Amino acid sequence: MTTSAYKTLAPTAARKRTWQKARTYAWRYALLVGALGFFGFPAFWIATIAFKSSSEYFRNPPVWIPASPNIAQNLDKVVRTGGLTSIGNSLIVTTSATLIALIVGTLAAYSLARYRTGGPNFAFWILSQRFLPPVSVVFPVFLLFRALRWVDTFHGLIVLYATFSLPFVVWMMRSYIREVPIEIEESAQVDGASRLRTLFSITLPLASPGLIATGIFTFIFNWNEFLFALVLSRTNVITYPVKLTSYFGPEAAFWGEAATVSLLATLPVVIATLLMQRYLVTGLTLGAVK
Amino acid sequence: MNAKKRTFAFSVVGAIAMVASACAAPPAPAAPAPAAEATAPPNPVGELAGQAKEVAASAVMTAMPPKAGGSAARAIELAKKYAGTTLNVTWEAGLQSQDPLLFSAPEFERLTGVKINVIETPFTELFSKAVADHQAGGGAYDVLNYAPTWLADLADGGVLEPLDAYIEQYMNKDDLNDLHPTYAKYQQWKGKTYGLWDDGDVFVMYYRRDWFEDDKNKADFKASYNRELTPPKTWQEWDEVCSFFTERGKANNEYGCAIQRTAGNTYLWFYEQFRSNGGRFFDEDMRATINSDIGVKTLTDMVNANKNMPPGVEKWGFVEVLQAWMDGKLGMIITWPPIGRWSEGYGLESKQLEWVPKTKVAGKVGYAVSPGGHSELAVGFMLGVSSNSKNKEAAYAFIQWLTSPEISGQRVKIPFALRDPYRMSHFNDPDYAKLWPNAAEYLKVLQEGAATGLADLGIPGAREYEEALDRAITAAYSGGDPKAALDKAAEEWNAITERIGVESQKAAYADWQARLGANAYP
Amino acid sequence: MIRREGYRIRYPSTPINRMLASIRALSDKRKGKYVLVAPATVMILAIVLFPLLYAIVVSFQNIDARTAVGTFVGPKNYLDAFRDARFLNALGNTLFFTGVAVTFELLLGFILAQTLIGHLPGKRFIVPILMLPVVIAPLIVGYTWRMLWDTQYGPINQVLGWFAGRPIELVWLANPVTVWPAIFITEIWQWTPFMFLVLLAGLTAINPEYREAAEIDGASSWQTLRYITLPLIWPVMAVAILFRALDAFKVFDIIFALTNGGPGTMTETISLYAYSVGFRNFRISYMAALTLILIAIVSVAITFLWRRMSADQERMA
C-alpha cells in the first residue's frame, strides 16, 4: 500500500501517523460511547419504569434501579385497563393491512416494473401519496368513513392503513422486481407459463428477500401509526398508541402502565428490525439509497 | 332563596340533626359495617382507620340493596327488561374509570343482566369523541359521561337525549329534591333536562392546621404582618401566608402553597379568582371582558403567586401537587375534594390507590373554601344518554341507578371512585362523617363550597373559550405579559362568540346567569 | 436454455378454469398491465383522492359542530386562515421545527457516520443499537421523554444536578427557554439515526481511494471533507434531507405527547393546530381549508423530491 511505503521512507512520520491513528480511535470510541449512552438511556429508563411500583417512579430524587424489580404489578394493571387488548387490536389491524398492501401493491409494482405502466409520472404519483401529511388526509377520510359508517371498525382502519402502505409497497417492490433479470421470466414464458404464473412462481421467489423486507417495514409503519387511529377509534378498535394517551390524564399519570405497554409494543419491532438490518436504509429511503 | 335557607339550616344545625335523620332510615341488612358504626360510640383515631377500611371494603364488594320504590330499585326493574344487552359507556380514562370497571358495571350486570362496556377516554376526548360519533351517524355510545359545561353544546348539537320523559316515568321525585340545590340548577338547558348530576367537584382549600397553630409561626407572622396567622380569607392574605411559610421552610424543601398550573385546567383557578375579585366574562354586548383591569390584576397576581410556590409549579398537575402535599411539603393547596380523603389515608390501602403517596399529613389538615369566599365548582361530571343509542331506556336506567341516593351514596365513599358528595343525603351521611376524625368538618366545607361556589362558564363553545383562556394563562406563566395574553384571549373569545352567533350566545349567557344565579356571579 | 418451442397445458373447460383462463389471458394481453395496477389505483383514488376532492368542496362552506349542512361561503375560510394569528404562528413553528431539527440531525448524523466509517472493532454491535430509535413509535418516544424531562421524577434534572452540585429544577416543558431544546433533543434522539444510517450507507459507497489520494496530496481533513467527501455524498444527503424535512414538517406525535403545543401556543405546529380545529372544536370547513393549504405547501417539497428521484430513475432505466 502507498501508506506503508511512506512509513518505511519516513519513520518519524510513521510514528506520528500511529499516534494519530491511536488518537483517532480514542476519539471515535469516546464519541461512540457518548452516542450509545444517549441513544440507549431512554430505553433503559422506560424499562426500569415498567419494573417499578408507582411509589418508586414517583420519587424525588429518581431511583435508577428498582429495589425489587417486578413487572407483574404493572402488567396486571395493563391487562385490567385494556392495554393488552389494544396491543391485540393493533396486531389485527396491522397484520391485515400489511397483507392486503403486499398483495395489491406487488401486483401493481410488477406492472410498473415490467411494463412501465403509466410512465414515470404515474409511478411518482403513487409514491407522492406517501408524503401527504396525515393530518390533511385524516379529515377527508373521516368524512368519507362517516358516510360509509366505517368509523371505529376494523375493516375501516385496515383499508385505510393498507391504502396508505401502498405507495411504499409499490415503490419498493418495483425496484426489487426490476432486480430480477427479465431473461429468467422470458424463458419461463416461452415454456408456456402465463404472466401471473411467472410472477408467482419465478419472480416473487427470486425477489422474496425484498418482499419480506417490504412486509416488515409496512408492518412497522402501520404499527407505529397514531393520528388515524386517534381520530377513527371509538370503542371497538382502540390500538395501543390510542390506549397510551389514556394513561396520561389530567387527574392521574399512569407511568407504569404506559411504560409496560410501550415496552410490549416495541419489543417485536426491535427484534424484527435487528433481523432486517441490511434492508433498513433501503426501506427508510424508499430505495433512493441502498 | 329556598335553597339558601336550607343550606343555612343544615350548616347551623350541623351533623347531629343529619345523623339523626339518616339513622331513622333502616340500615341496610347486607351492609353491616355502616350499621354497626351508626350505633357505635365515638371512636379513637386508630379504630376509625380500621373502620374506614371496612367501609371501603364493603362498598367495593356489593351494591347496597335498594330501597323499595326508590330510584335505584325502579332503575333495576326497568333495566331487567333489557337483560343481555350491552351498553357502551364513556368514562374518563384511568383512575376515574375504576369505579365503573370494578364496582358499578359488574354490580349493575349482576342485578339486571345488562352488561356495561366501559370505554375509557381521555378527558378532553370525552367531548370530541361524543360529537364525532354523533356526526358519524352515532351508535357507538349509549351513556355519555361529560363535563357540565359541555351540556349546552351537546344538547344543541343533538348529541344528548332529553331525559324529562324518563324522569317523569321512572324516577322517584323525592330523589330529585335530595340533590344539592346548586347542582340541581345544572341539569337543564332551554327548559329540558339533558343529564343527571354525578360528581360534586368543588375546590377546597386544604391547609396544615399544625403549621397555623404553631406558636412560633404565630408570633413570627404577627411580627411581620401585624395580624394573626389564620387561614387566608382573601387572595392578598393567601399570598402573604404562602410567602411567609415559603420563606421559613424553603431550606427544608417546604413551601407555603401550591396550585396545579400545568396546561389544561389552569383556567379554573382564574375563573375562581377572577369572579371573586368581581370580574365578569362578558359585557352587555357579549364582548369578552376577561381582559378588564380585574382580569389583568387576577392573572398578574396568579403569575406572582407562582414565585412562592415550589419551583417547576408551572408544569405541576394534580399528581405533583398531591405528591408534595402528602409528603408534608406544602402549607396550603387548593384542589379537588379527593385529596382531603387521601390526606387522612382514607382508602389508601385499596389497590387502585396504590399509586397515591403515603400520607404524612393525616390528622393535620384543615379545610376551608377558597380565598375570596367562593370556590370554583370545577368541572364536575354529568351522565347523559346518547341520542343515537339503540337502548335508551336501558341507558337511562343505568344512570338513574348510578346517581340514585343509595348507589351514589356508596360511590362517594368508594375511595377510588373519585366521586365527591353532591346529594343532601351524602352531606348528611353519618357514616361518611365518621370516616376520619374531622370528616364532618370536611363535609361541611364541601357543602358550603357547593352553596357559595362558582359554576364554570356553561354556554355553547365552553370548551373553546376555556382552551383559549388556558393558553393565555400558560403563556403568562412562562413569562408573557398578562395584559397582552388576556387581550389575545379576549380577541379569541370574541371570535368564538361571533362564529357561534352573538345573539344566540347572548341568550345562552343570560340563561346561564339566570339559572345559576349567585353561582354564576357572587 | 431458451426453448423456442413451448406448449400449453389444456385445462378442462369448467367455469372456474374458464375464469382463470380469462384472467391469464388478461394478464397476457397488453391491457393486463392495467388490470394489475387497477386495485392499487382504485384504493388510492377512493380513500385518498376522492375524500380530498370532497374536502375542497367543504372548505368553501361553513360546516361546524352546530351546522351540519353547510352553505357556500366562497374563499372565506382561506382568507381567515391567513389572518389567523394562531395559524401563522403554527406555520412559523413548523418551519422553525423542521429547519432546526433537520439541520442538527444532519450534522450529528454525519459526525456519527464519519466516526463509524472504515474499520472499527465492535462496529457490528454498535450500529444496531444506534439505529433502533427510528423504528420505535414516535408517540412512545414522546411519552418516554416526557417522563425523562420531568422536573421532579425525571433523571435529566437529577444528572444535571450532579454536575452542578446543587439541585436543578428546570421545568423543561413549560419554560420558554428550554421547551424547544427539550423537543429538539427528543426529536433528534429519534431521527439522527436515520441520517446516520443513510449517510453511512452513502459514505461506505464512496471509494476510499479518493480520500486516500487527497490525503497523500497533503489535503487537510477539512479540505478532504469539503472537496472530496461532501460532493460525492451530496446526492444521498439531498435525498435524506428531503425525506426528513417532509416528515418533520408533519410532526404530530412527539409534540402531542410532550407539550401538546404549550406553553400557550409556543410549540404548536400545523398538524396540532389543524387537529385541534377539526377534532376538538369541530370547525370542519375551516379545518378542510387548513388541510388544503398544508397540502399545497408540501406539494412544493414533493416536486423537488420528484426531480431528484426521477433523475435517479432515469439512471436506473
Image (cartoon, coloured by chain):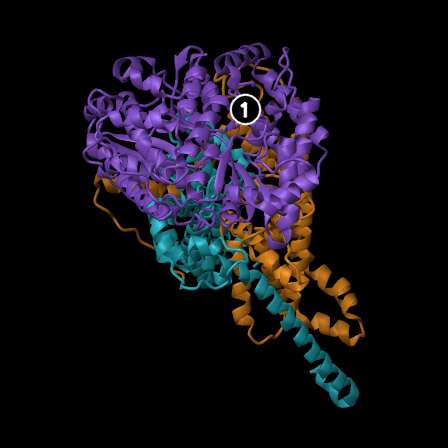
Q: Chain of mark 1?
A: C
Chain A's shade in the image? Answer: cyan
Estimate the x, y position of residue C14 in percent, counting from the top left: 21, 40
Estimate the x, y position of residue A202 in percent, counting from the top left: 38, 57
Residue pictured at 59% horizontal, 27% vertical: B372
Chain B's shade in the image? Answer: purple
Q: Is residue A157 left or right of residue B260?
A: left
Q: Is residue B486 above or below residue C92?
A: above
- Secondary-structure class at tag 1: loop
Q: Nearer the viewer, residue C128 or C264?
A: C264
Q: Is residue B268 above or below residue A3?
A: above
Q: Quadrant of residue C43?
A: top left
Q: Quadrant of residue A136?
A: top right
Residue pictured at 51% horizontal, 20% vertical: B458
Circle 1 residues within 10 Å: few <14, some 14–19, many ≥20: many
Q: Is residue C89 left or right of residue B332?
A: right
Estimate the x, y position of residue B109 in percent, counting from the top left: 23, 33
Residue pictured at 29% horizontal, 40% vertical: B55
Task: Provide the residue designation for mark 1.
Answer: C283
Q: Is residue B237 above or below residue C220?
A: above
Estimate the x, y position of residue A125 in percent, counting from the top left: 55, 39
Amino acid type at image mark 1:
Arg
Chain C's shade in the image? Answer: orange
Q: Is residue B209 left or right of residue C182?
A: left
